[in-house]
Image (tube, helix red, strand yellow):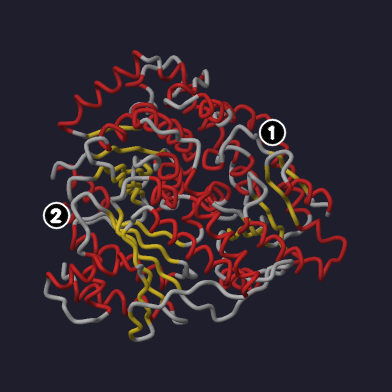
Amino acid sequence: MTAEARQTASIGRYDNQVGRALDRLAKQAFARRLWERDAALWKQGAAGEEIIKNRLGWLEVVPTMMRRADDILRFADEVRAADFKYAVLMGMGGSSLSPEVSRLTFGVRKGYPDLRVLDSTVPAAILEIERHVDPTSTLFVVSTKAGTTVETLSAYRYFFNRVRSLKAERAGDNFVAITDPGTALEEEARSVNFRRVFLNFPDIGGRYSALSYFGLVPAALIGADIKGLLERARQMMESCGPDVSPPDNPGVALGAVIAELAMIDRDKLTLILSSEIQSFGCWVEQLVAESTGKNGNGIVPIEGESVGAPEHYGDDRLFVYLSLKTRKHEDLDAKVRALESAGQPVVRIYLDDVCDLGREYFRWEVATATASALLGVNPFDEPNVRESKDNTNRLLDDFKESGRLPEDKPLLDEGNIKLYCDAETQAVLDKIRAAGSSKDVSLRSYLKAHLNQCRPGDYFALMGFVHTSPAVDAILQSMRAHLRNAYKAPTTLGYGPRFLHSTGQLHKGGPNNGVFIQFTADDAEDVPIPGEAFGFGILKQAQAIGDAVSLRSKGRRLIRLHLGRDVEAGLKRVLDLIRTAVPP
């Protein structure tokens, strides 16, 4: 099957529009200029162009990593020989999502350490790792491009202290760093004798780093076929080469479809994936959201939402269906055919086997760069991510001085659930309630008023600064399905603080078409951060409050529901209230 045949588009009346876009890209020599690192493709000023030129290393990283694959594999063998039973990767966003895809897609080969990804500041997540691994037989991978990521370094300090209490000066044997040259993490790693320091390429941004050390070292540790991944990526690299015309270029063609449909309000890029590769959607979500959500523009990736009947969708979707062609997915195939028959635009991408994820990493990187150029945004910065970080740091500084975080008075405190919003939001909700049938002062009436702010073209964003579990996730997924069916509105789900490094940029930098619900909860037990005056619980709270401040400053429609200590019970109650307030 050729690269072109692996990707088909059934977009009906939008064919001509996409065709014209591909013609424009051909006249601009887009593919050639992309490979020449022509920053002018993204319409930035001189300063922006310099930043872009230093973020295009992902285009040529595959052959470099093919030459370095044997070294990575030798390191994986060294880890096996040292009899490590577990590996814990501490990272955020681009440093953690590709490793998580590898763990969930490839599994762990016999004799290799079992990999867990830690990308949370919720104390329960730290404690869960600690209770399930023996620190002395665990390899901790500290993964951060900048070397300053607060979540990653806080986790590192905690576990390094734990290992040092057991192994003294040999603690460094249990640690590996993946970072850029010259970072504080590199200096720290060498000073305490980490087992290995992998220095990545500074001209690759975090979300474009899946085919670099950030993605390949963790994959090798669990026995994944990294040479196979790189070979498939090389094949896609050739298919997307500088001399391939846009219609025949899988990455450019996909990017053109995504951008052109987004510009006519089909900006909800809805990913449908067969079960074997389901986790890949989280990686695409970050890549697309953080790259395109700028200057009031943006494509909203919808990942993990159950596939509904055609009548549950509006006219704001583009569906992309990724499936293994060697497996049967009759139920999913039937649902996608129903969407096509109803006139929904659908792109299909076929994978030979799971190793084809190497192709997909590269295809989607090119597609995202192309879509961003057509939308007129810089896909290689993330200005609003910094904003939430600054808010968090300011709150933590205040905590160090006063010993507490600011806490607004709840609008309602009902049944162990507290509802928070600012005065402006309360006024809007009161006006909606007064105009409707929900005039009682209750959590149900305020929830209904908030949800009824949803307009055609909007989406719901559920943001949980809580510890995830199968039960918690199932409740939130049920909430998504109900909201989608009731409003014909797309839904997203993000767990904090990890989503701050992915969809968080889109929430604040993209268009104002989100209706946000933030969930917070009390911690049954806090966990100290060595060298800090606060623990992970306070850090998590500061991140939640800081993100809310940032969202409100952008005029986003936001409420916060504090669930108390029993997250599962609180979410069940919220789901019941939504179901009664807004019938499907």
- Reading the image, the residue beneath label 2 is 311
Q: Which type of secondary structure does the marked residue at label 1 adopt?
A: helix
Quadrant of the rendered structure where residue 412 is?
Answer: bottom left
Decide which of 244, 220 is in the foreground and name it.
244
Q: Work out whether residue 298 can be spotted.
A: no
Q: Which label is found at residue 150?
A: none
Q: Which residue is drawn at 16% across and 33% down?
A: 12
Q: Residue furthest right?
A: 169
Q: Residues within 10 Å of mark 1 (few under 14, many from 20)?
A: some
- Reading the image, the residue beneath label 1 is 68
Q: Is residue 139 above or below residue 48?
A: below
Q: Work out whether residue 461 can be spotted.
A: yes
Which of labels 2 and 1 is toward the front? Answer: 2
Q: In this view, does 293 lie to the left or right of 233?
A: left
Residue 399 placement (x, y as % from top left): 61, 70
Q: Which amino acid does label 1 sit on?
A: Arg
Decide which of 75, 469 is in the foreground and name it.
469
Residue 343 placement (x, y as % from top left): 14, 41
Q: Which type of secondary structure does the marked residue at label 2 adopt?
A: helix
Quadrant of the rendered structure where residue 118 is?
Answer: bottom right
Residue 411 placement (x, y as % from top left): 34, 77
Q: Residue at x 36, y 45 (%)?
A: 510
Quadrant where the N terminus sits is: top left
Q: What residue type is labelled 2?
A: Glu
Q: Is residue 240 left or right of residue 203?
A: left
Q: Residues within 10 Å of mark 2 (few under 14, many from 20)?
A: few
